[in-house]
Amino acid sequence: MVLTTILLRRSHGHLLWRRLLHLHFPLFFSYSTSPDSIPFPPMAGTQDDLSNFEPEPEPAGPNKPDSTDLQSFIQHLSTAKSLSSSQKQALSLLKSSWGVEVSKELVCKAMWEVRKDWELALVAFRWGEACVANYPWAWLFIIQVVCRKERFDLAWVLVRRMYRNGILTQQAMIIIMEWYAAANQAEKAIKTFYIMDRFKLNADTETFQSLLQALCRNKNIEEAEELLLTNQKTFPLTSENFNIILNGWCNIMPDILEAKRIWREMSNYCIRPDGTSYSHMIRCFSRVDSLFDSLRLYDEMKKKGWPPPLEVYNSLIYVLTKENCMKDAKNIFERIREAGLNPNVESFNSMIHPLCEKQEFEDAQAIMEKMTVKGVFPNYETFHAFINQDNIEETLKIFRKMKEQECGPRGSTFLFLLEKYFGSNEPGNAMKIWFEMKKYQIEPDRSHYMALVKGLVKYGWVLKAIEYYNEMKSKGSIPDPPLEKMFKAFLSSNKEHWGVGRKFTLQRGKPQFHISIGANVYSQGNNLNPYHDLDWNKIR
């Protein structure tokens, strides 16, 4: 009922239609060449390239044990795993081959070191469980490790064991809720919140706000708003809670109409906007180049006694630069100092980004040189602005400069460029970017593979797409059901084109489907090799 009310209150149905289009035509809405593809203006506290696609960083590791014992321990873990068909067998092998006493510090550090291999981390945890039985960090960490791979079944087993051991805390449930939200399972995240009392845990305001933030961070903003309104008797509506929703529409899924609606809703519920509310709205107005509204709210904010934080000044710098008010934008730097603040790298980025968007790269370069003279050094987002230019050779030069200044390039840099080039009819450049990743020791994650596979499919290179899709799954990434279905149909409808010994098969793997491709299939003729006009050797 509340969700219906939310939808009816909206003056436009554009968001609902947008979500329906994404649902039914996902491959056609996968690429963005808008300025929003690069963070704008750079957000305070923007996470690194890993956490752009993963909700939370790993927790801080424990004290470091003896390095020799640690490496030997990890080697035994890897050997036991490779020689065993099950975790039970691996544990049995470890017990018979490892003669050194296991300590809490050794187990925890080993888990930390092998955290990217969830199975290996779990073996380490189970082997040393007696040592960490009453050490919450180890339990919370391994829950996060298995949730990262969407093994929520194992996470719940661990939660129940923590409960029996008397060490279960709200943090364990928060981790599960955050990862459910990251896996686009908002309903399960919310259900987890509601069943906390079964484990004799208090679902307090902090936990409630953590869930709201997790939902919004992963673009389930409507669900977060519904949750907020349906629980207002238990968790009274406050500006702090509304600001989480407002942040979603202003910064995570920028939508000025939705942001304005939430602003009105706050008034309807007699909630006064605070300084954070104004900061979010000013940023949102600056995103859509609304100079008048940005300045209006800035003046209103000061009149109501809310001192503007640095991020507000950065938003004003952006919108003034965007509207070619360069003199006024530069004057904002003086206002920053008058307010007792110091311009940071985001302040200068807020001027550099719009200049680069307007292809005024020389002026942007001058700003970057000025900031370094003032002792403010560029970050990877500064360089991201310059890679928005069309010349790929210049982009590669920027990569080298980023590496020299230890600013990347990062995984998010390559993801942006993959989407940009596939979206702008430049698949050859997209593939150059893909091969360039290896030169900078960037390990592609699922988001990179999905951008690549969808791009190859978009341009008809289905066979090459299947090859990279298989590679993605071989690294432990979860499959994509729409792609699985499409590839299965493709293989089924084209199997008569392959000769003896060149068959394509779709096999059921564990725990997911795997597509196997026969050898030398790419040499079977142009009708089956739709990317024959692309010279892969030259791209590499």
Image: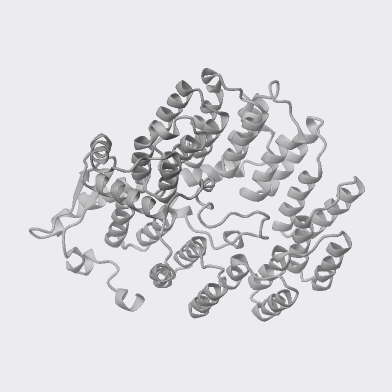
Q: Quadrant of the C terminus?
A: bottom left
Confirm whether residue 539 shows in the render. Answer: yes
For the N terminus, give its image quadrant: top right
96 vs 282: above or below = above
Q: Nearer the viewer, residue 163 or 435?
A: 163
Does residue 254 appear in the picture of this structure?
A: no
Left or right: 190 in relation to 526: right
The residue positioned farthest toward the front in the image shown: 100
What residue is rendered at 55% in x and 70% in y?
Answer: 406
Where's residue 283, x and y in %? 73, 54
Display coloring: one colour
Q: Residue furthest right?
A: 303
* Residue 539 in which image quadrant: bottom left
Q: Nearer the viewer, residue 336 or 109?
A: 109
In the picture as drawn, the residue positioned furthest to the left comes out as 500
Residue 395 in percent (x, y) is at 52, 75
x%, y% of residue 460? 33, 62
Q: Is residue 230 above or below residue 16?
A: above
> Looking at the image, how many numbered discs can be counted on the residues?
0
- Residue depicted at 49% across the width and 36% down the height: 140
Q: Is residue 530 left or right of residue 262?
A: left
- Residue at 46% in and 26% down: 162
Residue 124 shown left or right of residue 203 in the figure: left
Q: State which quadrant residue 525 falls in.
A: bottom left
Res 98 quadrant in image: top left
Where residue 321 appears, as percent x and y from the top left, is 75, 68
Is residue 370 placed above or below 131 in the rendered structure? Answer: below
